Image (cartoon, rainbow, N blue to C red):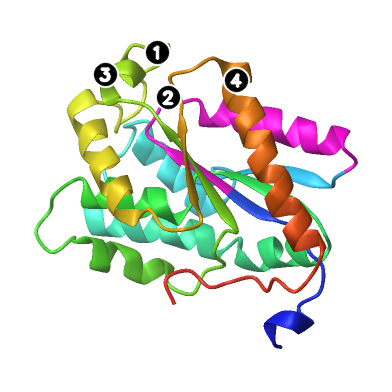
Amino acid sequence: MTQSDAPPRGAFIVFEGADRAGKSTQCAMLVDHLKSQGIDAELWNFPDRTTAIGKMINSYLTSKSDIDDAAVHLLFSANRWEKRETLLNKLAAGTTLVVDRYAYSGVAFTAAKAVPGFDIAWCKSPDKGLPAPDAVFFLNLSAEAAAARGGFGEERYERPAFQEAVLKQFEALQGPEWKVVDASRGIDEIQNELREAASEVVSKCKAGGVPVPHLWA
């Protein structure tokens, strides 16, 4: 299929950022807004903690179990791969997906551990070929500001020094499809900026001629 032949479809929008940057709140608000505009939209989360793989990941993140760094990285990737077919079918049916975290988080968090051999290239490799998002909204918030927010520290990775390392890895992953948003502002101000950006992406995909790209292909 050539690009011009690609049929109309839903948009694939990913939210990324350090922990406690406000992603979940902004994702939910954006989905509600899209629905109010008559757009078929769904909110997804990665990891999807409802699957068998996702339950293993949840046990690790909540420090109820320990898993080798390489193994847990591959589990996160497998959790995305097991949703691939459903994701593509949803987009083809015209549903816009707003996704709280994706493969970029998997790469950034593992690379931030600074384990020998776990460079960005190695971290990317399991996710190569997955559907790539049409847009990535990166909520940029300093580790210090995130640590001051409620709930910080409840999960394994929520340590200020580690979150700072994660932010540096995210910087290395940014591409032309990324929109960096100042997440230190008020919730409504952030949301208004995101709605405007999302509207452009949704309209473009709805018009057709935009095939779903492949991640890091």
Q: Given contact means CB atoms under 8 Å apart, are the residues at marks 4 and 2 in contact?
A: no
Quick one: 208 or 51, which is closer to the camera? 208
Magenta stretch: give its range: 14-38
* Residue 181 drawn at (x, y percent): 48, 34
Which numbered disc covers residue 149? Answer: 1
Mark 1 to mark 3: distance in Å?
9 Å
| Residue 199 located left or right of residue 171 | right
Q: SS for tag 3?
A: helix
> Which-is-in-front pick, marks 3 and 2?
3
Give whichever of discs 4 and 2 has the lower sequence position: 2
Say which of marks 4 and 2 sits in front. Answer: 4
Do the residues bearing badges 1 and 2 touch, measured as CB atoms within 8 Å?
yes
Task: Report the Cα–Cα distance between label 4 and label 2.
Answer: 17 Å
Which residue is tagged 2? 20
Look at mark 4 in the image and give the residue it sits on. Answer: 189
Against 45, is 122 above or below? below
Residue underneath mark 3: 144
Q: Residue furthest bottom?
A: 1
Q: Residue sitting at 63 percent across and 18 percent down?
A: 188
Mark 1 is on which residue type? Arg
Secondary structure at numbered mark 1: loop
Residue 20 occupies quadrant: top left
Of residue 122 and residue 2, the one placed in the foreground of this image is 2
Q: Quadrant of the C terminus?
A: bottom left
Q: Up-down: is 217 above or below 89?
A: below
Q: Amino acid at mark 4?
A: Glu
